Image: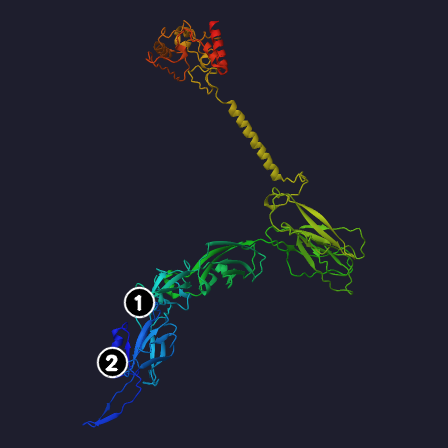
Amino acid sequence: MRISTTSCLCPVLVCLCFIQRCYGSSHHLPTKVPSKNQTKLANGETEVHHRPKRGWIWNQFFVLEEHMGPDAQYVGKLHSNSDKGDGTVRYILSGEGAGTIFIINEETGDIHATKSLDRERKTHYVLHAQALDRNTEEALEPKSEFIIKVQDINDNAPKFPDGPFVATVPEMSEVGTSVLQVTATDADDPTYGNSARIVYSILQGQPYFSVDPKTGIIRTALANMDREAREHYTVVIQAKDMAGQVGGLSGSTTINITLTDVNDNPPTFPQKNYQLYVPESAQVGKPVGKIKANDEDLGINADIKYSIINSEGANMFSISTDRDTREGIISLKKPLNYERKKAYTLHIEGMNTHVDPRFSYLGSFKDTATLKITVGDVDEAPVFSMDYYIMDVYENAPSGTEVGTVTARDPDGRNSPVRYFLDSKEEGVRYFRIDESSGLIRTTQPLDREAMPWHNITVMASEVIQTVTAVDKDDFANGQRFSFALPSQLPVNPNFTLKDNEDSSASIIARRRRFNHLTQELYELPIVVWDGGEPSLSGTSTLTLRVCPCQRHGRIRMCQGEAFLSSAGLSTGALIAILLCIVILLAIVVLFITLRRSKKEPLIISEEDIRENVVTYDDEGGGEEDTEAFDIIALRNPAAAEELKFRRDVRPEARKHIEPPRGRRSPSVEPDEVDVHEFIKQRLVEADMDTSVPPYDSLQTYAYEGQGSPTGSISPLDSPGTQSEQDYNYLDDWGPEFQKLAELYGEAESDVTT
């Protein structure tokens, strides 16, 4: 049997068929072994002679995938040597797809594919062929196996199975630093043509990154990319088959690249000078303030170590780093004393702890700032001149005998007076008392040495401050004992606080050092007092404190019962401000009146300005009968105006003007009697020569339009003096619509005749 290939196969396959037929291959499956004849050659080798009989001659069949034609696709032809073409041989197929995908013509041996095949689903099919005698159904040839391969076409685009991708690269990396390698896969046959030959290119991400077209390795393409300027980048990579040629299929993926931090930024203080207030009562070893330098880096690259680099500050203060906030915590090493030193200057340095030597060219990774610490004065307790005193007194000495004197002073700068008292916690009989001003201790009764040779007493000293006491009408067996406190339900008073002296009195202590009686003179402080009875009863009172003015050098002036407006709630400063505003308003009024009185009077006080004026009226004139709006007789009769020549500063008397009947003219104002042009010239000369005019400039305008117009005048002033001969009686014949018009013209004619 012989296998012939279809004409659509390439010549190479045909050549392979002939080569395999001539030389044989592993794909040939001989079915019958011929008898062998051996011939011994002269060189001792044996030559074997084969006598071939009928048998299969095989080759692989090829069929194109994705065939979309209307007819079945021709695959190839089977032919047996025993087939003489007389139709006695019948060909049959068995195996994968036989009868469903592949069919064979039993007479000719032609094989066709009836369905469209997909190489990516199945690359080849294994079938078996056999030639039978049509009459006897006996096998003319043994059943043999052959393969039909599905030939690939470019019907699959490259894909990135693992995308999208996330990658990182250190900032400030050199150009060409590898970031990530992406790989695309193509389901087409990589051994056939360029269907699976992929080329990579970058669609988005330039000029920051590039991609190798063959390997898909993404690299940095721009030097000194700074994370602090931009941290995230989006890169889109395309993979295209057919070696990137036109018509190739393509796929893309996204890579989100993040720049990781390196230590390329030094720490910097936001400002170079800082100030800090620390009271002298601050505890040693406790934080008193903090300072922070900013670093744009992240993680360990932003770790900062703070230090005090000058001896003045390092002797009194220490600084440490808070790892969470990266702040410098300033603590006190030694006690502060406002009276000895009121201010300290600290030079603080902040330095990175992890420095990258690659960026040493950027400079030193540290910064300095100056911190000025101001020591606040605190009201300190008095200090005794000695820690303990030993005094002697004779036994049986009378009551009031002086035992000794203790001395304490106020360590504050103001050196306030000191008040002495015995500790009220000591129980038992009191044998001694102390003068609260001088500190002199006296006996309260005679002492017995044999009964008690030693007496230990505790003396307390406090600054002279205001104290409050309470009274109770109840009778207590052990004496009256009171406790004092501020109301707990009220907010903390920012000006004053209260200290229970535990001797049935309380001291009022100022929270701040300075008060100004001009700003606020009176303060109110509610105080709650409890008695020592069972059950304990309490009461609340309001203490009013007055701020008194002081003399120079801080000496206190005794507060006098000065009058104040407590009911109105106005302080002295407010009253002064109100009085000052009133004085300013009075001054403005007086100045305004003075300016109005000193205003200059006009040069000429007259109801009528003698200058020529043009007065514009927006009302409509009354027509020919309106003779009061403007009288032009002066222009038509210059002689009549001469009498008013030198009386221009006198208001003219009202004159009654009688208009001549309509249609007639006055004989004294004929248009040709006077030349208006000459009259205007005359008035111009008079205005130039007149010495009685006011001293200011005056503009007098005279214009002459001329005379003798060929069209004549349409003004009723120049109309002929003859009356109209028009007869309006015919209007009566026009009907009732014109009756009113006829009456009006009839009345007008009647008036003219009269």
Q: What is the three-letter code of the residue carrying label 2?
A: Ile
Q: Quadrant of residue 215?
A: bottom left
Which quadrant of the structure image shows residue 58? Answer: bottom left
Residue 12, picture quadrant: bottom left
Q: Residue at x 60, y 43 (%)?
A: 519
Give the number of the mark in front: 1 or 2.
2
277 or 464, which is in the foreground?
277
Which residue has dot 1 on it? Answer: 243
Cα gap from disc 1 to disc 2, whole angstroms: 32 Å
Q: Which class describes the residues within 10 Å of circle 1: few (<14), some (14-19), or many (20+)?
A: some
Q: Position of residue 38 (x, y in %)?
A: 23, 93
Q: Nearer the viewer, residue 577 or 194?
A: 194
| Label drawn at residue 19 | 2
- Say which element carries label 2: helix
Q: Nearer the viewer, residue 478 or 532?
A: 532
Res. 315 in view: no
Q: How is the image coloured?
A: rainbow
Residue 296, disc: none
Above or below — where is 233 with respect to 633?
Answer: below
